[in-house]
Amino acid sequence: MDDNRSREVMTDLQDLKLYTLEEAKLVVGLTPQTLKRHIRDGKLSAKKIGGKWRVTKSDLEKYINKDN
């Protein structure tokens, strides 16, 4: 694999970082309850994994950059 492709793969893997709502609250300064409401309302994309909400780094960045 060439160096450019290696960098692309590493960037893709970094974007796959999954935040719990407890971790995401530290980034955005909102309570987990508020984040759950925003997930329900479609303002924040998230997936349930093992019964707990997870937010990708890229979805969290999109959420931060939106007008909420």
Image: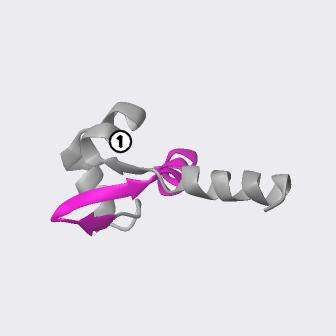
Is 16 colored magenta in this rendering? no
Q: Is residue 48 left or right of residue 60?
A: left
In the displayed structure, 25 sits above or below 33; it is above
Q: Position of residue 67 (x, y in %)?
A: 53, 49
Magenta highlight range: 47-68
Q: Is residue 61 left or right of residue 41?
A: right
Task: Look at the numbered disc 1 and give the secondary structure of its residue.
Answer: helix
Instruction: List the residue tagged with mark 1.
Output: 24
Q: Residue at x 36, y 63 (%)?
A: 46
Q: Position of residue 37 (x, y in %)?
A: 25, 57
State the image quarter where residue 4 is shown: bottom right
Amino acid type, residue under disc 1 in the picture: Ala
Q: Residue at x 83, y 52 (%)?
A: 3
State the image quarter where residue 2 is shown: bottom right
Q: Is residue 12 left or right of residue 4?
A: left
Q: Position of residue 13 (x, y in %)?
A: 56, 55
Q: Residue at x 22, y 45 (%)?
A: 32
Q: Residue at x 58, y 47 (%)?
A: 65
Q: Badge 1: few (under 14), some or many (20 or more) residues near its Cα, within 10 Å?
A: many
In the displayed structure, 30 sits above or below 17; it is above
Quarter the N terminus occupies: bottom right
